[in-house]
Image (cartoon, rainbow, N blue to C red):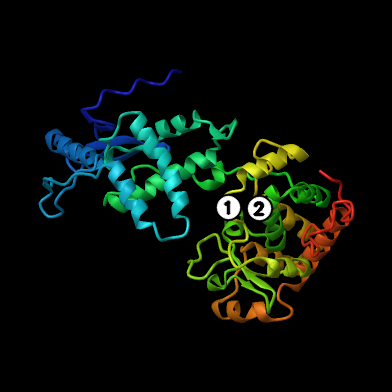
Amino acid sequence: MPRAKRPKPLYQRGKYRLDPPRDGREALIITWYDPERKRERSISAGTADPENAAKVVDKMFDESQGRSFCPTCGQPIQGVRSPLVLDAIDRYARSKELLPGADAIRHRLRHVTEYIEETGQEEVRCNQVDREWVDKLRRWLAAKPVRAGDTERERALSTIENSVLQLAAAINYADDHGARFRPIPAKEVNRTPLYRANVDTLAKMFAYALEGEKRKNLLNFLRLSVLTLGRPDAVLEATTDPAKDQWHPGANIFNLNPKNRRQTKKYRAVVPIARQGVDWLNSLPKGPVIAVNSIRKAWDTMAADIGLPGDRESGAKLIRRSMADLLRSRMRSTDWPEVEAFLGHRKFDSVSELYAPLRPDYLVNARASIEQIIDEIEAQVPDAFYRADTARSPERSGRKAA
């Protein structure tokens, strides 16, 4: 049978409708659709009088739009307005300026400000940003491809949702009422690449990076990524400057979290350095290991040259993921916690964190497996990690001339 037509509400304001009482009840019912819970909700109006019940509906609607009410008398508070979204974004970004990840926060929020400016919504206020508004933002971002040099690619859902997440944080920071929408959980939008590079492919990367001084930053990125399994941002920020307290040549350990940088959820570990990387790190001048802030262009050029898969399967995080996969395949499962420690997924307590890296057995099995992988890379590409005699020709080092 066709579904019975719903009777007209006694009163309606926005999405809130006033309906007759349920069977056996006197109080009228307020009904609305909750997009967050994806179902219809209802509450009692607390009165059987339609006029008073309509006032309750009005109050619910006004509160949903960000108006404030006195908790004592219930009257609207005059002069309190929800802040402009652009002001909220600016205040939130400035509050994060000294924290790790500030650049990423600003970059993600820049997409929101561009949307507001392009659509002429400079006067939009935080209490007007609801689920429908955010859905339009998502569609706008999805239609904007990501451009890198002469190439462009589809914007990932996770990238879009990162901007939505930062927008919610900005509104929560600036508006007492908080955001009126929920970002989609990361697990529902993240797509972890499945491709992993084997030793032969890693060797091809090093062979490519060794050809020419212009590829030195890419080479250093590859070296430190294999040695530490660090995230790309941590590797790019790494330095041998003693003031940053990262490279400890006496103990042959590298702290991926520089001095005075607060740890975040993406924990940066202290890791032992394989023997093949010690001379290389000691040979570097005191300063940044990689002299540029990004190796994206160099990486993409290399990926195309050696035939790495596209469709976001082989970004700069490929080294970290591939090394973790190779280590797990070579180590006993009982030693896998050492891999987790390298990745920063497993932490020591505050006391152990101070002393464990100085012990001879600190992550010794993971380090031994990394040394084995490096030996296999250098069997195909001599000098992949350190060339003591820079005057040697490509023929003497076992590589073909460019």
Q: Position of residue 320 (x, y in %)?
A: 68, 55
* Residue 183 found in image quarter: top left
Residue 344 is situated, as x and y percent measured from the top left of the image, at: 61, 64
Say which amino acid is labelled 1.
Val
Q: Which residue is mark 2?
A: 217
Task: Tell me what residue is drawn at x 70 percent, y 64 percent.
Answer: 339
Nearer the observer, 23 or 5: 5
Q: Nearer the viewer, residue 318 or 259?
A: 259
Q: CA distance from mark 1 to mark 2?
A: 7 Å
Count numbered badges in the picture: 2
Say left or right for 350 vs 126: right
Quadrant for the C terminus, please.
Answer: top right
Residue that sits furthest to the front in the current view? 391
Of mark 1 and mark 2, the one earlier in the sequence is 2
Local SS, label 2: helix
Q: Is label 1 in contact with label 2 (beta carbons under 8 Å)? A: yes
Instruction: Say left or right for 36 vs 19.
Output: right
Of residue 204 and residue 348, the one placed in the foreground of this image is: 204
Task: Work out whether 127 lies above or below 351.
Answer: above
Which residue, given by chain and number where applicable, does mark 1 sit on?
A: 292
In the image, 178 versus 267, the foreground residue is 267
